[in-house]
Amino acid sequence: MDPDRIVVLAGGVGGAKFVRGLRALGRRTPDRSPDVTVVANTGDDLWLAGLRVTPDLDSLMYALAGVNDEQRGWGRAGESERVSAELTAYGVGWPWFTLGDLDLGTHIARSAMLREGLPLSAVVERLSARWPLGVRLLPATDDEVETHVVTAEGELHFEEWWVRTRAALPALAFRQQGVETATAAPGVREAILAADVVLVAPSNPVVSIGTVLGIPGVREALAATSAPVVGLSPVIGGAVVRGMADACLTAIGVETDAAAIARHYGARADGGLLDGWLVDETDAAAVEALAGSGIRTAAVPLWMTDDDATADMAAAALRLAAR
């Protein structure tokens, strides 16, 4: 299948690795390279020390620009942290949420543009123009929709639960504050409706993909599009590939299992999300387990070890879409 228009729903680090692989796949046949639009989760966003921080959008932008820190998996390469140390000395911000100096430059620029009245989607376009990303990057919404976690010790912003507690506090529920009155950012619904294929990156199903799907208008566009919707499992052999998505899945009563996540998303024919689902070869039993579910499933290698391996994953997703 050689689609002209691909939309990817994505979170941060895992989503960024997948989109880099998809871009690498397009470069194998430059005369047939598709237009790719990435719709990114904004539920991790927050105001901190007077600055608007957008972790997933930045992870995507930095990774596609080739300036991300490959060792940590987030932030900029070659960072220093002098400004964060000064903020801590003044008692400002979260001392355990360290932002690098180059990264802070991005947050300052973004916050200045937002205060000038630009919507987040326009800010993302201006920031992304600095580098040839090879894709169009869109926030799921221009509105402030922040994910909070309900715990026995109170309600925390998702980043506090994720970074400070390392998800050690059991999550009782997740709340996307402001989601009911939010609208999809300009271009999001249009891109989905015009797509030839929609891919769901192997990102956190609860707080990344789940937040994108919670924005009013997004699910409706996915239901209406003529494009097949194919997802890739973020779980291999009963374990999450990266991060602590298992803690999020447990909180909503979903097993950390490739087939269970597909059932959580649901078949599009039954009002859910998916037409197709890729699992790792380790989870090949899921192909039979999901037979008759309305979700066409295939097993292929899903370890994103490098851009070439991830490009092969993306190619498998497109082949499944063509079926």
Image: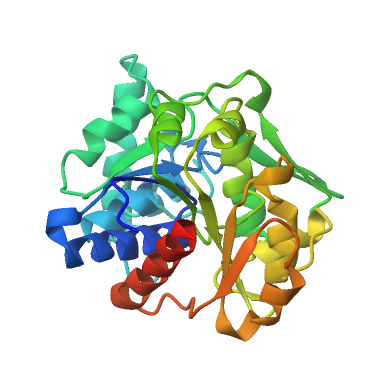
In front of the other: 270 or 189: 270
> What is the residue that sits farthest to the right in this orientation?
152
User: In the displayed structure, does residue 7 sit left or right of residue 256?
Assistant: left
Residue 145 image position (x, y, % from top left): 58, 30
Can residue 67 be seen here? The reply is no
- Residue for point 64% across, 27% down: 179
Q: Position of residue 308 (x, y in %)?
A: 29, 76
Residue 152 vertical position relative to residue 189 in the rendered view, above or below: below
Counting the numbered discs, the total is: 0
- Residue 44 image position (x, y, % from top left): 54, 44
Q: Which color scheme does this rendered protein use? A: rainbow
From the viewer's side, name the closer residue of 159 and 31.
31
Residue closer to the observer: 109 or 259 = 259
Residue 293 relative to residue 128: left or right: right
Q: Is residue 172 left or right of residue 128?
A: right
Residue at (36, 52) in percent of width and height: 60
| Residue furthest to the left | 31
Which residue lies at the image location 41% right of the left edge and 33% below the top edge? 51
- Residue 85: image location, x then y, percent: 39, 54
Q: Vertically, is 305 above or below 52?
A: below
Q: Which residue appears at 47% of the width and 78% of the height?
A: 303
On screen, residue 290 above or below 183: below
Q: Is residue 4 visible?
A: yes
Question: What quarter of the picture does the N terminus occupy?
Answer: bottom left
Query: Could you tell whether 290 is left or right of 253 in the image?
Result: left
In this view, the residue farthest toward the bottom is 282
Which corner quadrant of the image does residue 17 belong to? bottom left
